[in-house]
């Protein structure tokens, strides 16, 4: 029985239909470890043991000419129950998509979105397990144990998450993952930075913000701005808007005049402190 997953790379080198080979290999190894850990957690209701691998094979097909997608097939070993296996990537359950999305979003500073995947994972495990025949108190204790194990596994998979997003920022601008018929889960540069930080960083939704510029560094795509959350102080804002690659551009020209710009941004926070501002889309100069 076979199930399809797709890993897609966008922006940067991917627009020319190639990705840095070393970083691509690192990314596939990271996804492989996350997928394997998720399947072990599903089958045995526990995190994987040291060096334990899932009884599955993930085979990546040769990339198609003119494509920047990696299409892979998951083949089930005989040990997997035929009735349980379809839940990994089929129908409304799609456990595998929820698991990979949960790990990457939790480690990537999107914890509110990750919570939705966590709740779905627990529901899938509940339906698949015979433990729901226990008393209500015992059942709640069982669910609490799964959540604790899932939290610990998320931390253990930080190195695998770092590997999975290795090309982002160096070779490509974003990576997406999907399994079965699920909508792609997108990992962009702000999320990739949060994963690499290995800390408790929360990335906001896209929001509109007015920023007073004070300087621009073209080679690092950084704009020095007045910190909108601490007037009188300054912060570097990283620019991921494609307009920044032009010279001159709207950002360098605004910085020359120390003008205020309006942009769509994402904000990285660590324990209520502003860690970074990511400028995604220029709106206008005010």
Image (tube, helix red, strand yellow):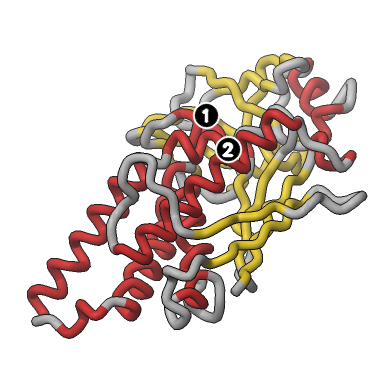
What residue did someone put label 2 on?
190
Q: Is residue 75 left or right of residue 135?
A: right
Instruction: Give the quadrant of the C terminus.
Output: top right
| Residue 278 sits in quarter | top right
What crowding class fits label 1: few (fewer than 14 Cα within 10 Å), some (14-19), or many (20 or more)?
Answer: many
Quadrant of the frame with the N terminus: bottom right
Separation of marks 1 and 2 at Cα, in angstroms: 9 Å
Residue at 38% in and 30% down? 273
Is residue 144 visible in the rendered image? The answer is yes
Q: Which residue is mark 1?
A: 276
Q: Which quarter of the picture shows residue 272?
A: top left
Q: Secondary structure at mark 2?
A: helix
- Secondary element at image label 1: strand
In this rendering, the answer to whether 9 lies above or below 228 is below
Residue at 84% over, 27% down: 245
Q: Earlier in the sequence, mark 1 or mark 2?
A: 2
Q: What percent of the width, then of the height, locates residue 195? A: 49, 36
């Amino acid at each position: 029985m076979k199930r399809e997953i797709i890993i897609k790379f966008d922006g940067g080198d991917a627009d020319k239909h190639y990705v840095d080979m070393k970083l691509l290999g690192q990314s596939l190894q990271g996804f492989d470890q996350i997928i394997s850990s998720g399947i072990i957690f599903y089958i045995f209701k526990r995190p994987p043991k040291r060096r334990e691998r899932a009884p599955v094979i993930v085979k990546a097909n040769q990339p198609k000419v003119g494509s920047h997608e990696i299409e892979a097939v998951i083949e089930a070993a005989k040990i997997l129950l035929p009735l349980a296996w379809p839940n990994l990537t089929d129908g409304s359950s799609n456990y595998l998509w929820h698991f990979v999305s949960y790990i990457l979003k939790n480690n990537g500073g999107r914890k509110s979105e990750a919570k939705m995947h966590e709740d779905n994972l627990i529901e899938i495990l509940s339906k698949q397990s015979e433990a729901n025949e226990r008393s209500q108190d015992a059942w709640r204790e069982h669910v609490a144990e799964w959540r604790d194990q899932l939290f610990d596994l998320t931390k253990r998979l930080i190195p695998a998450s770092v590997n999975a997003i290795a090309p982002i920022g160096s070779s490509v601008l974003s990576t997406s993952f999907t399994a079965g018929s699920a909508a792609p889960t997108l990992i962009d540069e702000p999320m990739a930075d949060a994963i690499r930080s290995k800390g408790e960083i929360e990335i906001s939704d896209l929001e509109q913000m007015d920023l007073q510029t004070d300087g621009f560094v073209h080679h690092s795509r950084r704009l020095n701005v007045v910190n909108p959350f601490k007037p009188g102080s300054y912060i570097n804002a990283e620019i991921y808007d494609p307009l920044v690659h032009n010279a001159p551009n709207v950002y360098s020209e605004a910085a020359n005049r120390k003008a205020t710009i309006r942009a769509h941004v994402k904000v990285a926070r660590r324990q209520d402190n502003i860690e970074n501002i990511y400028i995604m889309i220029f709106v206008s100069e005010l």
